[in-house]
Amino acid sequence: MSAPLLQMDGIDKSFPGVRALHQARFDLRAGEVHALMGENGAGKSTLMKILSGIYQPDAGEIRLDNKPVQVPSPRAAQDLGIAIIHQELNLMPDLSAAENIFIGREPRKRLSFFTDDAKLNADAAAIFETMHLKLDPRTPVGTLSIAKQQMVEIAKALSFRSRVLVMDEPTAALNDAEIADLFAIIARLKAEGVGIVYISHKMDELKRIADRVTVMRDGEYVATVPMAETPVERIIAMMVGRALSDERPPAPEENGREPLLEVRALNRGAAIRDVSFAVRPGEILGFAGLMGAGRTEVARAIFGADPLDSGAILVRGKEIAIRRPQDAVRAGIGYLSEDRKHFGLATGMDVRDNVAMASLSRFTTPGGFLREGAMSETAKRYIAQLAIKTPSDRQEARLLSGGNQQKVVIAKWLLRDCEVLIFDEPTRGIDVGAKAEIYKLLNALAAEGRAIIVISSELPEVLRLSHRIAVMCEGRLTGVLPAGASQDEIMRLATQRGETSGDTRPSAAMGGRR
Amino acid sequence: MSSTTGTPAGTAAPGAAAKARFSGAQQRLLAFASLIVLVVGFSLASPNFLQTSNILAILQATSVNGVLAVAATLVIITGGIDLSVGTLMTFCAVIAGVVLTNWGMPLPVGILAALAAGAASGVCSGTIIAKLKVPPFIATLGMMLILKGLSLVISGTRPIYFNATPGYTDIAQGSLVGTLIPSVPLPNGVLILFLVALVAHIILRKTILGRFTFALGSNEEAVRLSGVNVDRWKIAVYTLAGGICGVAGLLISSRLNSAQPALGQGYELDAIAAVVIGGTSLSGGRGTIVGTLIGALIISVLTNGLRILSVAQEWQTVVTGSIIILAVYTDMLRRRKV
């Protein structure tokens, strides 16, 4: 066992009103991938921001190579060989890859005032070479895929000759092939003796690459265990502080009722090709598929956010024309976007205003004034009903955790009496404990007779929730599977490219249609 | 909304949106084409338009706004805005007047004083923005009023004439090029505009200051997290812009042979208009000096051409306003298509 490269001990950090870290600790060996886990708000990010000089600890010690060090600024962290790759990539989209990598350290010439761009690009190319990355250093970063942008961040970290590399949810936006590339690079870095701190919620990934895992909860250190020998359930139990109840998919509902929502032959360019399906009241229809399969596009089209080339949308058997989102809302269709912060929530406004947002006309007096009392009352009712954890209905939405923000968005659509609810990645960025609650809520909403569509890239989630599973690939609905389908069956349909199958499975593809 | 159309599962949308930012060259091309169309149109409409004297008049009229627009471009690329360029120009002119006329100092001292006054004001704006974290709009709005007031106070609200400084009018109105090549009587004001633009272009494209100018506008937080002293570079950009406003102050007072303390307000909007028409993004991170020059020329050509066609002055501003909206709208259309 090698001596630790890095040790953090007894770290305390408080923000006004919140104790973010209490006696937190962490150690990292050279050449290991050490996973850092914990629910959102457990203090992982704060600890890593202290390590990288963004925050200063109130107490505690950081030792590098067994020598105490101070990290007063990001610059100091870089000089010590500590690099962090943030979840929200910190790149300058208008600058080239090479310019991004060497920002603040540009090679200079003539009076140190002019940049030496030839050397800049050559140096960047040399780093890409060591990463086996084919990328022109002069490419503007904004034109690159998220995966490539991440590689640029890694190249930047390598350019500092970093010995400690912190990666915060690096695979959140990557597809499987890109994840494989990333892991290959991580393996090479490991071999060179770089210590890697890997923050992620994705257990299967951690099983693949992590050597050890440290779990944090409520700002405190819980335990450090070897990844390979520790069962997933035990790690989850350490994270949430209790064992989660056994999770089984709900029994499929076989009601013979008319579909609440039916779509026929939707088409939009190459993104949506001849998609038809139906959802009955009380049913949860899961949508599985790889990234870019067209699931979000279908949802947005049904919601009127994007125009359709052709196709029909029927609610309760009646065809309705949906040209704008407000048409969809009027027909009782609610869409919960995957990007809550951008499209779902007014994060600077309070819970009450967010809940009432889509139904403000109901809370307006004839004179145009808002009936704040009624809004408050309604918001409080949903806070209780959905168990939203918030100090009051006047709390700003941005201060809630991801899971509770999601519930606020759900409340908004429930208040609008939406009978059809489309959830796009409902648990993205939500921790394990809150996920279970969202699942319970979705089941309850379905049991009340609503039709629910759940789009998810996490297969276990789709399998656990859905009564039927629609699978898409390259804009086509390649099949609809019953609950209890295996992951293999789904993956087969999700990768079924082209028209090879012709019309051999129309019964499957047409699912709920009779 | 529709900008995310067709991107897989929405996740690639940020990349796609960023991608759109790189076709600024198209906007410049569009601006340049508009300039050509305007010139051709006006020459067909009036035989007087293309005469050498008129062309020189257009260029001379562009010089002050062009220099101010170059200053504004630097600041706008950082994602900021500078509303004080107009009154700062006047302030610098007044300082030159005080130094030359009231104190009787030699011409070079007056020039240096004007440039120094501009740079000092830039240091103030930059410090207020970088250190006190006051949003650039507010900070420079405040500076705009402060400088306007100071100009009036220092000058005693009266114009300061440069009659005692022979050669002062030559700064803008003489023709160095004309003495060397008699057939091209290019006024010094225009020459100075081109020089300022050239220097600014080189600084933006080739120097460390330029790199940080773009980086700040592109993602300031990323620059900060890269361990760069963000505040220092931001102050440097505002300082450089302030110094350039000093050049504009010398130009305008040379043309008028006087520092007019009541002048200045309103110039900042013409400058920003030129920047925007030239394809520089108000959200920062991208922009070019060439585009800004074209933008400034479009405004001058419009003003001059409409005057030659005897369109009332009132209508000229209506047209300029419409051009600004049209320029930004076409820019957005183009981005949506990507």
Image (cartoon, rainbow, N blue to C red):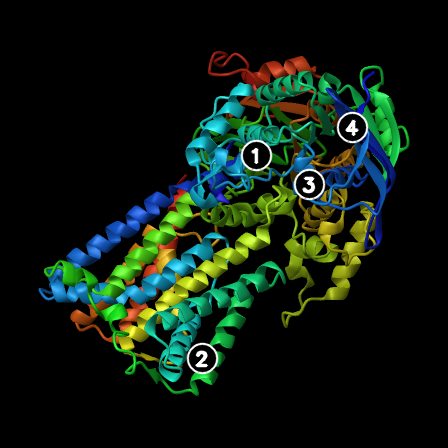
Q: Position of residue A218 (x, y in %)?
A: 86, 40
Chain ID at mark 3: A
Q: Chain of mark 4?
A: A
- Secondary structure category for the residue under label 3: helix
Identify which residue is drawn at 74% across, 46% down: A55
Asked if disc 3 and disc 2 are in contact, CB closer than 8 Å, the reply is no
Q: Name the N-terminal-most of marks 2 and 1.
A: 1
Is residue A476 visible in the rendered image? The answer is no
Q: Is residue A494 left or right of residue A193?
A: left
Both on one chain, marks 3 and 4?
yes
**Mark 3 to mark 2 CA distance (whole Å):** 45 Å
Give the x, y percent position of residue B180: 15, 59
Marks 2 and 1, how far apart at CA: 53 Å
Whole-Å distance between the Cαs marked 1 and 4? 40 Å
Which amino acid is tagged 3? Ala
* Residue occupied by mark 3: A76
Screen quadrant of the C terminus of chain B: top left
Callout in the foreground (3, 2): 3
Task: Using the image, name the chain to which the residue with label 2 belongs.
Answer: B
| Badges 4 and 2, same chain | no
Query: Which chain is home to disc 1?
Result: B
User: In the picture, residue B159 is in which quadrant?
Assistant: bottom left
Q: Circle 2: is it few (<14), some (14-19), or many (20+) Cα within 10 Å? A: many
Name the disc covering residue B289, or none.
Answer: none
Q: Which kind of residue does numbered mark 2 sit on?
A: Ser
In percent of width and height, residue A12 lies at 86, 44
Q: Are labels 1 and 4 on one chain?
A: no
Q: Are marks 3 and 2 on the same chain?
A: no
Read off the residue under disc 2: B151
Residue B11: mark in rendering: 1
Foreground tag (2 vs 1) = 2
